[in-house]
């Protein structure tokens, strides 16, 4: 029960920050996505299972605030949590390097796949060329910036995760005492 | 394959298949997206209203101190009487701007007398960078429905895409999923497709497709009323750039909406009178 409550508090706080305040810290009109960063960090620190559940719920939150068909972000969030969790075998407490690398790579991956699910169908009628040009322009305009911007938030969440979340489940407890040497 | 692993794969496959069914349902029906999205918004909306109110308070508080510091600086360089007069002028200018905005809003309200106007505050913005949607604090309890037009004093903001008891999600005209038909108020010609564009949305603009050679920079595009969603004549935006190509199919124009989305805090939802 305590475990569910702590995750719920995290998700509620991040949702409120994401939907009310993050606009104010946008760089080049690009907002960081705290929910994606959270899915990545939870996957890395707590494993695939928890990562998938948190990804699913975070996706539901993103779906409920967007104009895209509901379910796309749930699916992508869940898969991101699973993927992130699958890479946590080499992860340990002080390893911020992996958090930095995966925050960047997975945000890029998430947004690229999201583009094909969410926006490519709209420009599909204009041809494959238009779909690829829009993707390229989206990379240039915000996906890259968003991926870089995810890094400091993922590091902060990494710290908070080890403080409050790791140790709430079996996989996480193993993680808590794993060392990089 | 080991039994446990096989079971896991089947479970994951079933969840993914289920999610694809959810996507299919919600992309074809409005009740689908309401069904899955409404519970989340119901839980989060009260907190959002509170945080939105707190956020507004912090900004006002900051502005208050900003103004005080400004006045102090002026006080050092000017006589008290001049400061007083300057302050009076500033206030008058503020009233003038406010008066103009209210006048515009009032004109719009008079124009669309057949609708009830439900005022709403923006309490949340879309979490990601792909869309230009936002959540307002009025919902079905005030008669707001899916597809209800949303306006402000300057023109069309968008339409409602999902609604629940205390809140609703607005899809703005610059959102990539938005499509509005309009006509050119100068030439009185119909323009078929004014749609959102992911890359223009970042700078608060949208795209008008299939433009002909009669279109000019500065033309005002207004709603046509053809779709039955928006009333005819609502200002949408002005043409700022024209990209002509060999064929009309490839030609497009960039439209600057009359609504300033970056400064939008309050909107009106047009609800059919009972």
Image: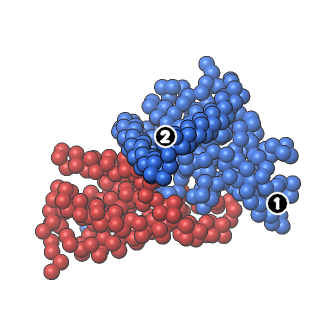
Chain colours: A red, B blue
Mark before the other along the chain sequence, 2 or 1: 2
Q: Residue at x 42, y 43 (%)?
A: B64
Q: Position of residue B179 (x, y in %)?
A: 66, 47
Provide the secondary structure element on which disc 2 rests.
strand
Label 1 packing within 10 angstroms: few (<14), some (14-19), many (20+): few
Q: Around disc 2, counting alpha carbons within 10 Å, would you say few (fewer than 14), some (14 to 19), or many (20 or more)?
A: many
Residue that lies at the very extreme toward the bottom in this rendered image: A181
Residue B65 falls left or right of residue B198: left
Residue A79: x percent and y percent?
38, 61
Task: State the residue in front, B269 or A43.
Answer: B269
Q: Please tell me whether mark 1 sits on a helix, a strand or a loop.
A: loop
Per the rendering, the mark at residue A103 is none
Find residue B122 and name its label: 2
Image quadrant where one finds the N terminus of chain B: bottom left
| Residue A32: percent from left, percent from top | 42, 60
Which residue does the image show at 73% across and 50% down from the upper left?
B238
**On the image, which quarter does residue A125 sit in?**
bottom right
Q: Residue at x 54, y 26 (%)?
A: B143
* Chain ID of residue with mark 2: B
Q: Quadrant of the C terminus of chain B?
A: top right
- The answer to whether any part of residue A169 appears in the image is no
The answer to whether tags 2 and 1 share a subunit is yes
- Kindly identify which numbered label has been placed on residue B248: 1
The answer to whether any part of residue B181 appears in the image is yes
Nearer-the-camera pick, A96 or B248: A96
* Quarter where residue B96 is shown: top right
The subunit carrying tag 1 is: B
* B223 left or right, relative to A173: right
Question: Where does the image place residue B196, in percent across and percent down from the top left?
Answer: 63, 53
């Amino acid at each position: 029960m305590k475990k569910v409550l702590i995750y719920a508090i995290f998700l509620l706080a991040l949702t409120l920050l994401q939907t009310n305040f993050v606009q104010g810290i946008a760089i080049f009109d690009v907002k960081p996505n705290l929910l994606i960063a959270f899915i990545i960090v939870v996957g890395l620190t707590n494993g695939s299972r928890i990562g998938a559940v948190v990804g699913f719920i975070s996706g539901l939150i993103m779906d409920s605030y967007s104009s895209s068909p509901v379910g796309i972000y749930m699916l992508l969030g869940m898969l991101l949590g699973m993927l992130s969790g699958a890479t946590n075998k080499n992860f340990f407490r002080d390893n911020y390097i992996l958090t930095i690398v995966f925050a960047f790579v997975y945000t890029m991956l998430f947004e690229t796949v999201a583009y094909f699910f969410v926006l490519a169908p709209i420009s599909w009628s204009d041809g494959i060329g238009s779909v690829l040009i829009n993707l390229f322009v989206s990379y240039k305009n915000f996906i890259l910036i968003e991926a870089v911007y995810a890094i400091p938030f993922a590091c902060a969440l990494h710290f908070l995760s080890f403080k409050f979340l790791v140790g709430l489940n079996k996989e996480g407890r193993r993680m808590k005492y794993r060392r990089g040497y | 394959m080991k039994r446990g692993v096989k079971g896991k794969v089947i479970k994951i496959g079933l969840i993914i298949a289920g999610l694809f069914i959810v996507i299919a349902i919600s992309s074809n029906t409005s009740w689908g997206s309401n069904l899955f999205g409404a519970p989340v918004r119901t839980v989060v909306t009260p907190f959002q209203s509170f945080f939105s109110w707190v956020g507004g308070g912090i900004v006002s508080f900051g502005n208050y101190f900003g103004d005080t510091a400004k006045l102090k600086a002026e006080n050092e360089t000017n006589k008290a009487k001049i400061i007083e007069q300057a302050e009076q002028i500033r206030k008058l200018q503020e009233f003038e701007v406010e008066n103009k905005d209210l006048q515009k809003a009032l004109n719009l309200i008079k124009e669309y007398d057949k609708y009830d106007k439900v005022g709403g505050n923006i309490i949340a913005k879309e979490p990601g960078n792909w869309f230009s949607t936002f959540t307002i604090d009025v919902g079905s309890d005030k008669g707001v429905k899916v597809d209800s037009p949303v306006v402000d004093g300057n023109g069309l903001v968008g339409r409602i895409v999902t609604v629940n008891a205390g809140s609703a999600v607005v899809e703005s005209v610059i959102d990539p999923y938005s499509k509005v038909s309009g006509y050119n108020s100068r030439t009185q010609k119909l323009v078929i497709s004014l749609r959102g564009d992911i890359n223009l949305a970042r700078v608060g603009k949208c795209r008008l497709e299939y433009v002909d050679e009669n279109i000019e920079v500065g033309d005002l595009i207004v709603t046509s009323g053809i779709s039955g969603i928006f009333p005819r004549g609502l200002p949408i935006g002005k043409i700022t750039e024209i990209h002509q190509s060999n064929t009309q199919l490839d030609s497009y124009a960039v439209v600057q909406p009359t609504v300033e989305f970056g400064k939008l805090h309050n909107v009106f939802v047009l609800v059919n009178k009972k």
